[in-house]
Image (tube, helix red, strand yellow):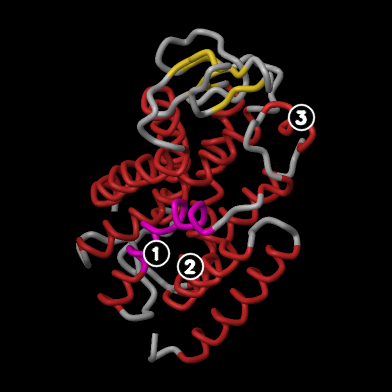
Amino acid sequence: MENQPLQLIIAVVVSLLIAGNSYRKHSLDVSGAFAGFFVMAVHLAVNYRFGAMLLAFFFTSSKLTKLGEERKRSIDAEFKAGGQRNWIQVFSNSAIATILVIAVWKLKSSQDICLDSSESYIITSIVGGIIGHYSCSNGDTWSSELGVLSEEQPRLITTFKVVRRGTNGGITKAGLQAAAAAGSVIGLAFVLPGFFTKSCTNDVFWKPLLVIPLAALAGLTGSLIDSLLGATLQYSGFCSVRNKVVSKPGPTVKRISGLSILDNNGVNVVSILLTSMLTAFACLYIF
């Protein structure tokens, strides 16, 4: 980063402005704003395309979280106005990518990169992992936030039985479509800045565009993995007092599905890790 002082300054200023504005709008609490600043600054300082993917995820997910708040309040037992995220939620959705971004910086400093396994097997797989990471994060968020607003009744991914809205592992057609669309947005966020920052001379002009359908598939896959983990390793039960689906057992709670092994943050981390690995391997094969 020391070779790119202007890029570092831009990264710090932009990250400060976004983190501060997000705190003001209740998208992040104080701890989330500090964590978000750090994560954004690292991404933007190393590569603008990494920053673009992170910001595409953050802005679209924040907007969708605020959509239909009244309905979500009546369904979600852990509802927060504005979807206010703390540092744990920020890092559960960005820590793996941040580690990978730092790895790219250590290997290539702030040079821009091409997805070309013949040029660099390691860089291509790492960048593929970052694409998979944000495709999964965005896909899970879009599918959850839009799926719960769908008129369609969710079905548990393990049994396909109809379950209550808000049940971990519940899926809808609208939610799955949203996950694929969310992934494609991440693909676009990676591809478009690349047209202005790097010329990949070894590629035919259309080959970088393959990132978009790959990211769409990663978004869908990540959402399915997240749902499968949620249905099996994350507890869901219906509380007769609160009249809502809850994630912890209790005397007034009737179990719907899952075991109390992972919470929502744990499910996010595992699904992101698996999707990142799958996307990294896919990039080596495609590029």
Give the label on residue 71, or none.
3
Q: In front: 250, or 210? A: 250
Residue under label 2:
39
Mark seen at residue 98: 1
Circle 3 Cα neighbour tier, 10 Å, few/some/many (<14 / 14–19 / ≥20)? few
Amino acid residing under circle 2: Val
| Residue type, label 3 | Arg
**Residue 171 coordinates in the image, percent (x, y):** 53, 22
Residue 122 on image: x %, y %: 21, 62
User: Are the residues at dot 1 and dot 2 in contact (C-beta closer than 8 Å)?
Assistant: yes
| Quadrant in the rendering for residue 18 | bottom right
Bounds of the magenta segment:
87-101
Residue pictured at 39% horizontal, 74% vertical: 112
Residue 156 percent across, percent down from the top left: 48, 16
Could you tell me the amino acid type at mark 1?
A: Thr
Q: Is residue 256 left or right of residue 99?
A: right
Dot 1: within a 10 Å radius of its alpha carbon, few (fewer than 14), some, or many (20 or more) residues? Answer: many
The mark that comes first in sequence, 3 or 2, is 2
User: For the point 53% across and 13% down, which residue is it?
Assistant: 254
